[in-house]
Image (cartoon, rainbow, N blue to C red):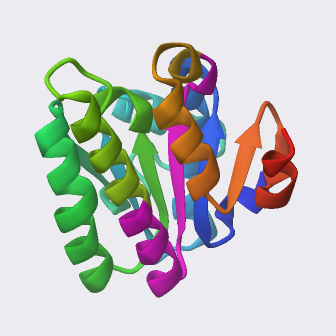
Amino acid sequence: MDRLFEPGLCLVDAPRNAARRLFQTLAHRAVHRDPHGHVLWCDGDHGFDPYDFAEENLVRGFAADEGADRVLVKRCMTPFQWDAVLTKHLSQKLSTTRTSLVLVLPFDALFSTEELADWEQVDYVTYGLSHLSGLAARHAVPILLGVDLRRWSATLPELAAIARQAVARQEVLGRTLSADSRKGA
């Protein structure tokens, strides 16, 4: 799990409920690994649960609210809000806030909507990935994108393929694939 804290853009492939649980655990670990760092959670489906965070603290011997003030959640429910959060708000926050981890969940869902034409979906995903990759490099921060690749590949294979090619690494069911190993797949 430590490799998920390495700087760079990483695609985390898991069904949404499993990704939520994993991201909740990662947020908790991040605030306790770096007592001054923040977790920026770009939340497109109300995945962050403050009660689970408090429970995790209690189980691990911390006060229920310890570190909770350093998990900053930005909720977004439309593709247009999602774009603004990922390409504007996140840049601003990274420039002003010591950040240990950025979580983006569900990256695949909010641009995969009938509100957008096919070409708009491609543009939003392509630009968003390029922008996030640049942010990860510029700020030397891990940015984790939660996606359900099986579902996304079945419904919008072009978008899933763009995402797989754009990230430096991909976490799939507990194993990491490098960009080179994915090209042959």
Point out residue 81 in the picture as x, y percentages from the top left corner: 13, 43
Q: Is residue 167 magenta?
A: no
Q: Is residue 45 above or below residue 141?
A: above
Point out residue 33 in the picture as x, y percentages from the top left corner: 63, 67
Residue at 54% x, 52% y: name it. Answer: 144
Q: Is residue 94 visible?
A: yes
Point out residue 66 in the picture as x, y percentages from the top left corner: 43, 55
Residue at 48% x, 48% y: name it. Answer: 63
Which residues are drawn in magenta? 130-150
Point out residue 111 in the picture as x, y percentages from the top left corner: 29, 33
Residue at 63% x, 41% y: name it. Answer: 12
Q: Is residue 143 magenta?
A: yes
Q: Is residue 62 visible?
A: no
Q: Is residue 69 above or below residue 121?
A: below
Q: Is residue 162 above or below residue 17?
A: below
Left or right? Give the position of 33 relative to 156: right
Q: Is residue 74 above or below residue 67?
A: above
Q: Residue 84: which quarter of the image?
A: bottom left
- Count the numbered circles shown: 0
Left or right? Give the position of 75 relative to 70: left
Residue at 60% x, 69% y: name it. Answer: 8
51 and 139: which is toward the camera: 139
Q: Residue furthest front?
A: 119
166 and 66: which is toward the camera: 166
Quadrant into which the C terminus falls: top right
Left or right? Give the position of 143 relative to 104: right
